């Protein structure tokens, strides 16, 4: 029986309406179902990396319609634009690509439907710069993760973005579980990841002093690090703009025209753009964009993960990014019954898992993040937080980080990842469409991989445009973003000298995070200013502390309004629909 017939038999058992066929090197699935889980399972069953390019899952979920937010503007601002390269998507990959593209003398334009960059998955994760110990050596995840990891320290230095290089730790609770660590050590050697070693509890406490008594030991991986994902994305975007790229916000791609295997027009709510080349970095919508371009060989099935941010007073409890091995079960409390997974089966399941599981992360700002979980969802826009996720995450982590509880939670958020059924990136030149580059299917370790992906995208773009004209390196490209003062990180004397020079740095607006008026004004006067409360929050952190903006938000709104020359009522929280003030309640009409 052929592999396609075997697949069809499995699909029919799952749902009689499911059908599979081969088309342009892909497996295409059709049918309908009222169960999202069955649709995802069908996609996973269809994966055959050796024989097919990918899975194009067109099975319809009955009664579901994807609702995509439309920007609150419609004009002709970009109508007739003819950039060399149009980047679709303002996440970390798109912004990194826009910056790297300007290393060449290319006219670069980036569009994003949001009011700011970094509004999707790039701002909704823990910011881990991954080691990449559990990837296949032939996977794009491995290739780009390793290259990106090597680039991060210098990149963060160039862009003035915080970075901590303290490693990652995988904890185990019993001696026999060291088998998993041994397997991972061998994989590290195969993947050329240096310094990986197993530590017994006594040695491990030199790295993580606050691990609980029941931990036997753990795998220490020194090449892991932590950054701030949204600050990195903003920094990449600002540096791209400084170097000549154009970033167009509130711009939604609604369709494309292709002729003879080439994109000729890209339609948006702000006019028709006619690029020579398109870079698809559209995140959870990357398969939709590939479909528009006639180059789709993959399907994104959204996967939601929730993270919880704890108060800085708990930040000391973790120094690295630390996770409990998925085969480790904490010893039972009094009255509990512990059911431990079987040894080899548990190890195999852990190695095959597509999620790193719930862990704890020391953020570069001194907080502790716990999470995420991983839930398959149909809605690409579903960033709602659920009580069950919160309770599950806290219950899973409180035995590893003893002493944390619901009272330590100051914020929580959910993000939607963009995995393909092959669970790998899709970074390549167009196959069926000549003038597109795919930077799609980006999930973890996307933050780590982004700068390496951007390098290849830029090189491929220069190679393509060189078919029409000479392309040279941009001699004026400056990889360094100007440093901005951070009074809270200065010595007393340095701070005094700064305040004497500019008193705005002495006016503290956010007491929790010690953010000054001068820092807020710097953000509003940057190469990519966005006059919204949450945009300022992402850039310089007012409102990120324990009170979550309860005290500082009115002051930040006032500063934004004065700088932008608008009324406080016209300052939104995020997009224009997120209204903060509706009017003056104490106004007296004459």
Image (tube, helix red, strand yellow):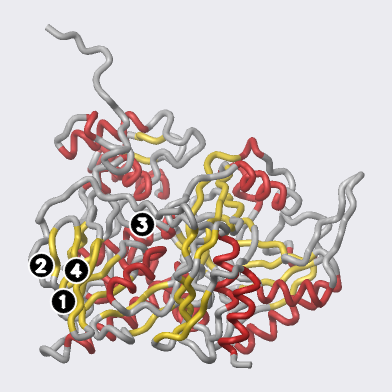
In the image, residue 415 above or below residue 168: above
Distance, label 2 to label 1, CA atoms, is 12 Å
Residue with the most extreme front position:
16
Q: What secondary structure is marked by label 2?
A: loop
In the image, residue 160 above or below residue 441: above
User: Which residue matches tag 4?
Assistant: 266
Distance, label 4 to label 2, CA atoms, is 10 Å
Q: Residue 6's spot in the image, x, y percent?
A: 62, 85
What is the number of callouts on the image?
4
User: Which residue matches tag 1?
Assistant: 264
Q: Are marks 2 and 3 in contact (CB under 8 Å)?
A: no
Distance, label 2 to label 3, CA atoms, is 24 Å
Question: Which is nearer the N-term, disc 4 or disc 2?
Answer: 2
Q: Residue 481's spot in the image, x, y percent?
A: 27, 63
Q: Are marks 3 and 1 in contact (CB under 8 Å)?
A: no
Residue 239 found in image quarter:
bottom left
Question: Which is nearer the N-term, disc 2 or disc 3?
Answer: 2
Question: Which is nearer the N-term, disc 3 or disc 1?
Answer: 3
Q: Nearer the viewer, residue 510 or 104?
A: 104
Q: What secondary structure is marked by label 3?
A: loop
User: Which residue matches tag 2?
Assistant: 81
User: Which residue matches tag 3?
Assistant: 118
Nearer the camera: disc 2 or disc 3: 2
Q: Residue 521's spot in the image, x, y percent?
A: 25, 43
């Amino acid at each position: 029986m052929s592999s396609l017939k075997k697949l069809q038999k499995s699909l029919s058992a799952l749902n009689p309406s499911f059908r599979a066929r081969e088309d342009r090197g892909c497996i295409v699935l059709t049918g309908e179902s009222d169960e999202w889980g069955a649709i995802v399972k069908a996609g996973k069953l269809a994966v055959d990396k050796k024989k097919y390019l990918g899975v194009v899952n067109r099975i319809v979920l009955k009664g579901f319609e994807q609702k995509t937010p439309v920007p609150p503007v419609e004009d002709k601002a970009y109508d007739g634009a003819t950039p060399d390269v149009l980047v679709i998507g303002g996440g970390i990959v798109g912004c990194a690509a826009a910056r790297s593209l300007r290393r060449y003398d290319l006219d670069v334009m980036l569009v994003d439907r949001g009011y700011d960059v970094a509004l999707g998955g790039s701002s909704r994760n823990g910011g881990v710069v991954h080691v990449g110990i559990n990837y296949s050596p032939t996977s794009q995840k491995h290739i780009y993760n390793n290259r990106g990891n090597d680039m991060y320290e210098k990149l963060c230095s160039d862009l003035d973005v915080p970075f901590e290089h303290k490693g990652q730790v995988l904890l185990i609770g019993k001696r026999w579980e060291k088998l998993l660590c041994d397997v991972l050590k061998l994989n590290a050697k195969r993947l050329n990841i240096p310094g990986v070693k197993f530590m017994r509890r006594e040695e491990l406490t030199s790295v993580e002093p606050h691990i609980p008594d029941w931990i036997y030991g753990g795998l220490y991986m020194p090449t892991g690090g932590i950054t701030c994902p949204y600050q990195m994305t903003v920094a990449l975007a600002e540096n791209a703009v400084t170097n000549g790229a154009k970033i167009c916000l509130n711009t939604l791609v609604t369709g494309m025209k292709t002729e003879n295997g080439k994109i000729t027009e890209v339609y948006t709510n702000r006019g028709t753009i006619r690029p020579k080349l398109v870079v698809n970095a559209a995140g959870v919508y990357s398969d939709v964009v590939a479909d528009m371009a006639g180059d789709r060989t993959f399907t994104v099935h959204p996967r939601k993960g929730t993270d919880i941010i704890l108060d800085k007073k708990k930040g000391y409890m973790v120094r690295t990014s630390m996770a409990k091995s998925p085969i480790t079960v904490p010893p039972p409390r009094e009255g509990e019954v512990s059911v431990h997974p079987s040894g080899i089966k548990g190890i195999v399941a852990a190695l095959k898992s597509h999620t790193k599981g719930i862990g704890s992360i020391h953020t570069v700002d001194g907080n502790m993040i716990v999470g995420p979980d991983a839930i398959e969802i149909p809605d690409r826009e579903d960033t709602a937080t659920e009580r069950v996720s919160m309770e599950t995450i806290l219950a899973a982590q409180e035995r590893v980080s003893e002493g944390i509880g619901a009272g330590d939670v100051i914020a929580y958020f959910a993000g939607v990842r963009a995995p393909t059924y092959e669970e790998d990136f899709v970074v390549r030149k167009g196959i069926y469409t000549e003038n597109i580059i795919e930077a799609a299917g980006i999930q973890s370790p996307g933050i780590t991989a982004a700068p390496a992906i951007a390098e290849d995208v830029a090189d491929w773009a220069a190679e393509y445009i060189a078919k029409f004209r000479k392309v040279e390196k941009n001699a004026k490209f400056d990889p360094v973003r100007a440093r901005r003062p951070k009074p809270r990180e200065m010595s007393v004397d340095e701070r005094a000298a700064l305040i004497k020079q500019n008193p705005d740095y002495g006016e503290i607006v956010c007491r929790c995070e010690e953010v000054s008026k001068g820092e807020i004004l710097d953000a509003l006067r940057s190469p990519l200013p966005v006059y919204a409360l949450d945009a300022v929050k992402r850039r310089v952190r007012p409102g990120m502390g324990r009170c979550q903006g309860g005290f500082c938000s009115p002051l930040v709104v006032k500063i934004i309004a004065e700088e932008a020359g608008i009324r406080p009522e016209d300052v939104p929280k995020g997009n224009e629909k997120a209204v903060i003030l509706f009017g003056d309640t104490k106004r007296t009409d004459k």
